[in-house]
Amino acid sequence: MKNGLGCILPNLSREHFSTTVSLKLIVAGREIVLSHLGPDYMIVRENDVPITEEHGKLVVRVDSSCRGQDVVLPQGVPAGRFRQVAYW
């Protein structure tokens, strides 16, 4: 299966029931952990300092596979917990 980020999910056999998934946003030299990812938004788990930088990299890791995609953050990343961030 291939998603919009160009990630290819591993072909899991019937013996494997769980997959380790990590979602991160790298912006202004910081790694920010994400809790959800949608088609044009992401939910930042926690960010203590607002970031005004408009360019970042979305990194998705599925088990041992990792892919990144450059993204534009038109409103930056607000401070706080579980904040929605628009991107394209």
Image: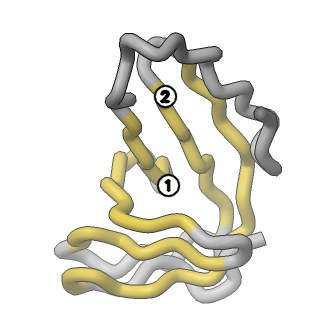
- Give the residue pinned by disc 2: 62
- Which residue: 28% across, 82% down? 82
Residue 53: percent from left, percent from top: 56, 70
Mark 2 belongs to which amino acid? Answer: Val
Specify few, some or many for label 1: CA neighbours under 10 Å numbering under 14, 14-19, or 20 or more.
Answer: many
Does the CB distance between marks 2 and 1 fall below 8 Å? no
- Which residue: 72% across, 43% down? 69
Image mark for residue 27: 1
Residue 84 sits above or below residue 23 on the image = below
Q: Which of labels 2 and 1 is toward the front? A: 2
Image mark for residue 59: none
Q: Find residue 47 and report its image quarter.
A: bottom left
19 relative position to 57: left or right: left
- Which residue: 54% across, 16% down? 12
Q: Find residue 67 and report its image quarter.
A: top right
Q: Which image quarter holds the C terminus?
A: bottom right
Task: Specify the color scheme.
Answer: secondary structure
* Residue 5 vs residue 73, the one in the foreground: 5
